[in-house]
Image: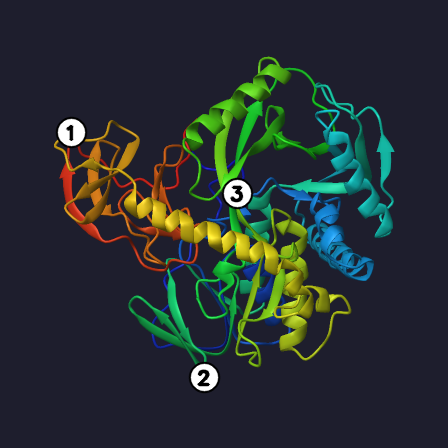
Amino acid sequence: MTSLWLDRPDLPAYPRVPVGRSFGIVVVGGGLTGLTTALLLARAGCSVAVLEARRLGAVTTGNTTGKITVLQGKLARIARRHSAHTVGAYVEASLEGQQWLLRYCADHQVPVQRRPDLTFAQTEEGRDAVGDVHDAAREAGLPVEWVEDAGLPLRTYGAARLADQAQLDAGDLLVALARDVERHGGEIFEGSRVTGVHAGHPCRVRLRAGEVRADRVVLATGTPMLDRGAFFARLEPNRTYAVALDVPGSLPAVMAIAGDQPSRSLRTAPSAGGERLVVAGGSHPGGRAASPRERVQELTRWAADHFPGATATHVWSAQDYRGIDELPSVGPLVPGSDRVLVATGYDKWGLTTAVAAALALTSSILEGQMPWAWALRTWRPSALTGLDKAVRFNADVAARLAADRTAPRVRSSAVVPPEGQGRVERDGQRLVAVSTVAGRTRRVSAACTHLGGVVTWNDAECSWDCPLHGSRFAADGTVLEGPAVSDLRRLDTTSTRGGDAAGDGVTP
């Protein structure tokens, strides 16, 4: 199933980029960061093109929960690692991104619903964690208040509340931004996967069928698809699931998120038949869940338990990346050169941070300055506060790679996986990923094309996910997202009942 926001007939479609073209600036990635960056540059008279590997919003933006809020649980984590000055700059960036987006929506008839936002505790033990969020927000100057009753149909143990936040339909925003980019002379191309960038004068942007050229390149791809800068080693991928449900009766007119485990996020969404409920949760490190399908089912059961009569209409998921020092990274891909710029590490708060990143990137390109951008800049000295976390993360990655290579495997067998299932087999010295989707059994290499991690089967989305750095592939091996830019190598394919290739479709 597709997300609630992308289930619509009016999403525009765009052609592949013609090879050999030259642009002033190429923006890689057609999500909120990429489209906002392209719009700001086009407004300034720059020659700009957006190159999207799949469809606009296909990855994180089209699969967001759609909350535009500055009350973020990560404020407490930032405060534990950084000075109050840095926390304040991050909040200022979030406010700037939020207010720009709200003004844009008002000016372009993108519907927005104003809501209070709450971070609530589900347990007595979680009360302290939520209290830390409350305290960090207040110290950063946000008018947050503590309430004992969160006003939700579940037991809570206090909540931090921030009034006058907002929510939207990400599909409405994508359509408005794309049309506005074109209106200002920018160009948009889909089905145009970038596989490499040579940072020269000009930059050469490599695609599968050739290349295009640009004076500068902006990587707005969630996680950078270039290994230069080694951002893949400084980002933790995290996958989260969402369910939209029809619920009889009225719903609380709030946005809310749990400050303790298990992760739960709630909001409403207007629909033709009234308000829908959107519940998100079930988070796990990318590629490291035994059964994502069970997480989706558990999330749906939780919603039905607390909202009797709830019936799921849409199920989807998104992948976010957390920086090792808890802050986003926005700026040069490598030190000393501004030919290739990057924005990453939003850690689930992309609707505010993506716009802030776009503002910071464009001000840098246009030789301006945002007063808070230093706190988000790549290669900042404060990133050293995350070195301990980076060491642990990469030691875990190395251990996982070694263990997966030597783990016992089913020997190649004529017994194919049942529908919707996949497994990794050993064929001599080769590891083979075998799956059956839509009646068709496929065999592809089990080695991720990024750094060789052994992929795992995602039984919710019928995809192969890498547990090292979050690259994802469709059942037929086609790369979907992550730092990988090449498909899994196809081996032999056996058709059992026919059917089309599947990938990235979450089933309830």
* Sequence-earlier tag: 3 or 1: 3
Q: Amino acid at mark 1?
A: Val
Q: Quadrant of the N terminus?
A: top left
Q: Amino acid at mark 3?
A: Asn
Residue at position x 65%, y 78% from top?
366
The CA distance from mark 3 to mark 1 is 35 Å
Q: Quick one: label 1, few (<14), some, or many (20+) residues within 10 Å?
A: few
Dot 3: what SS? Answer: helix
* Sequence-earlier tag: 2 or 1: 2
The CA distance from mark 2 to mark 1 is 53 Å
Q: What residue does disc 2 label?
A: 202
Residue placed most toward the observer, 351 or 285 = 285
Asked if one can make out residue 469 in the rendered structure from this viewpoint, the answer is no
Q: What residue does disc 1 label?
A: 415
* Cβ atoms under marks 3 and 2 closer than 8 Å: no
Give x and y (percent) for residue 483. Answer: 43, 58
Dot 2: what SS? Answer: loop
Whether residue 295 sits left or right of residue 455 in the image: it is: right
Q: Quick one: label 2, few (<14), some, or many (20+) residues within 10 Å?
A: some
Q: Amino acid at mark 2?
A: Pro
Q: Nearer the viewer, mark 2 or mark 1?
A: 1
Residue at position x 54%, y 59% from top?
234
Give x and y (percent) for residue 490. Answer: 20, 51
Q: Name above or below for residue 231 compared with residue 362.
A: above
Give x and y (percent) for residue 472. Answer: 39, 48
Whether residue 260 sits left or right of residue 244 in the image: it is: right
Residue 46's image quarter? bottom right
Which residue is situated farthest in the bottom direction here? 201
Q: What residue does disc 3 label?
A: 63
